[in-house]
Amino acid sequence: MPRLETADIETDLSLFKYDNLAQLPPAYRTLDRAERTNRIEAALATLGEDVVVLAHNYQRAEIVDHADFVGDSYGLSTEAAATDAPYVIFCGVTFMAESADIITDDDQTVILPSMEASCPMAGMAEALQVDSAWTALTDATDDTVVPVTYMNSYADLKAFCAEHGGAVCTSSNAHEVFEWAFERGDTVLFLPDKYLGRNTAHRLGLEDAIAEWDPWDTAGTDAAEVATADVILWDGYCQVHERFREHHVTALREAHPTANVVVHPECRRAVVEAADVVGSTATIRETIANASAGETWAIGTEIHLANHLDRWYPDVEVLALCGDACMDCNAM
């Protein structure tokens, strides 16, 4: 498996020398945007087919504008797997580049511009915590527990699920993976996003059979009681989507009575119930792409994607669901 590495300023492929962007040499930090753009495009033209640039939907416009492909974590992984380019620059967070590194060939190198770009939610399910929880839960029940992890997690957690008869899901196929898991066991342990897990359980009619496992308060968590649930949710979340509240939807509809609302399934249950459409970032993009001219859509996901959609589809009125209170992903 090729190594995952940060870009080196000494090489032709360099974007950043240091993990901390503030440590970039002043010559790079003080460039105006036009000059940066010209230099990047010139470098990419020189490199040609030797490099492919992948950018997540949540990246800023000045990153997305240089990308060969823009998409969600799953979509970008499929592009990484499909390319023959020897170098893959993955403008995303660590678990995304890690996944791409696993599925690309040994003679390809995946470059993550900054190793500081770590997803807080992925970091909420540490291997030692998961091992401890698994032991406690499986010791407390004779039922078969099947672990399922969201793709937005690190490779060690994906490996853990595989080793224990589980699987990896996306936000789009989580319900299908839950059904697959219940064909093989009695209980699903879902990690690391409790909101996606809860929304998936509701979709399957299991809203009354849910328990949560708090890895930071194991003393206050009764493993025997939790293990009686059909769905056990790890207490992790995306800080961007967790910020949305039902009152944001109410206020939006009051201000824009004809507006439609589309949100990500990483949002709280009440927000999902109040929305018109729920889906992955790919689904959100498709929803706006297929909207009729003059329609109004409020976007309940990371603010940069809402801004991109507003740029890409000028005939559709695109609003950020919580206005100025909407967050960007601080790792992007």
Image: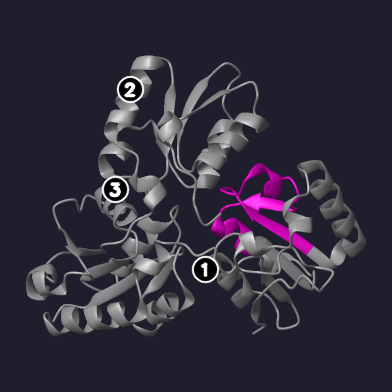
Mark positioned earlier in the residue sequence (2 or 1): 1
Q: Which residue is mark 2?
A: 251
Instruction: Check residue 95 in the rendering and tell me which mark sits there, or answer none.
Output: 1
Task: Compute the Cα span from label 2 to label 1.
Answer: 35 Å
Q: Which mark is residue 203?
A: 3
Q: CA distance from mark 1 to mark 3?
A: 27 Å
Name the quadrant of the N terminus.
bottom right
Number of marks present in the image shown: 3
- Tell me where residue 165 appears, x and y as whole percent: 35, 80
The amino acid on which the numbered mark 2 sits, given as a three-letter code, is: Ala
For the C terminus, the image quarter is: bottom right
- Identify residue type, mark 1: Phe
- x and y, in percent, of residue 287 in the image: 53, 34
Q: Earlier in the sequence, mark 2 or mark 3?
A: 3
Residue in the picture at 38% in, 51% down? 239
User: Looking at the image, do the residues carrying marks 2 and 1 touch, with CB atoms under 8 Å apart?
Assistant: no
- Secondary structure found at label 2: helix
